[in-house]
Amino acid sequence: MAEQLRQPFANSRRTALVNAAVREFATAGYRTASTNRIVQAAGVSKGLLFHYFGDKKSLYLEAVQTCIEGLMRRFDERLGPTSADLFERLRQYTLAKWSLFEEDPTTFAFLQEAMTDPPLELRDLLVASTAEITASTYQRLFSGIDTSCFRPGVTVEQAMRVLTWTFDGLSKQYATLLRQQPLDLAGIRSVMFGEVDTYVALLRRGIENDMGSAGT
């Protein structure tokens, strides 16, 4: 019975450490993050941090894994049924992702740095620890796409890669903007969603007109 009572308490302290670590890493970055500030924010002893995680490196990896798993669950709930149209599906993904960013910009700032500019000594470990989630995400992204309107020779993977680069780049642009200068989220949402629709139309129709294509 005593063990059953201790377990939820231990889990709550571990969760508090991970949450405090996410905030610290998002604000200070991995190298300058302070374990002293993390334990102070979590309200636990420094010895407990090392008891649960061993070192700052393991705490960082645990924080990344926890954030990704939590965001993926919330993302699936937010997304709902997806369109078989490639462009509409990427639009749905981008807007759902942004709505989660609005709710929790700190977590997204932390994950963006971890995924795009990770500490060199953690890069291989991060790739290995997130490989299964990444593969599952892309599998769902590709699944059930209607390819009847594709040009001959264009695969779903090729098309999705181009579109993912476009929309991921757009999301990162606005996420960086918000980190540099806190702005009105509703205003940013309006501008960004307008850009998403513009890029969807541009990619669907192509850039060159018929005369431009004929002249090359």
Image (cartoon, grey):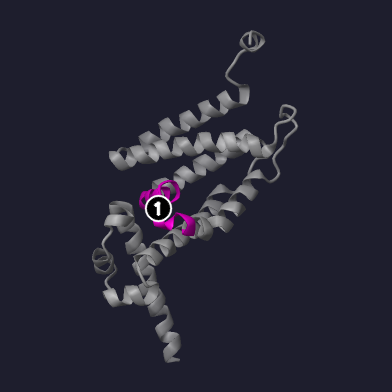
Category of crowding for the residue at label 1, using alpha-carbon neighbours closer than 10 angstroms: few (below 14), some (14–19), many (at least 20):
few
Three-letter code for the amino acid on which mark 1 is drawn:
Leu
For image coordinates 35% across by 74% down, the residue present is 13
- What is the quadrant of the C terminus in the image? top right
On screen, residue 102 versus residue 73, left or right, reads left
- Nearer-the-camera pick, 8 or 42: 42
* Horizontal side of residue 79 vs 20, given as left or right: right
Q: Main secondary structure of the magenta part?
A: helix
Magenta-drawn stretch contains 103? no
| Local SS, label 1 | helix
Quarter-of-image position of residue 213: top right
Q: Is residue 116 magenta?
A: yes
Which residues, given as a range, are shown in magenta? 105-125
Q: Residue at x 29, y 77 (%)?
A: 47
Q: Is residue 31 above or below residue 206?
A: below
Name the residue located 37 percent from the left edge and 48 percent from the top edge.
Answer: 109
Residue 128 % position (x, y): 53, 59
Q: According to the image, label 1 marks what residue? A: 120
- Residue pictured at 52% horizontal, 33% vertical: 166
- Split into 4 quadrants, where in the image is the N terminus? bottom left
Q: Is residue 175 left or right of residue 194?
A: left
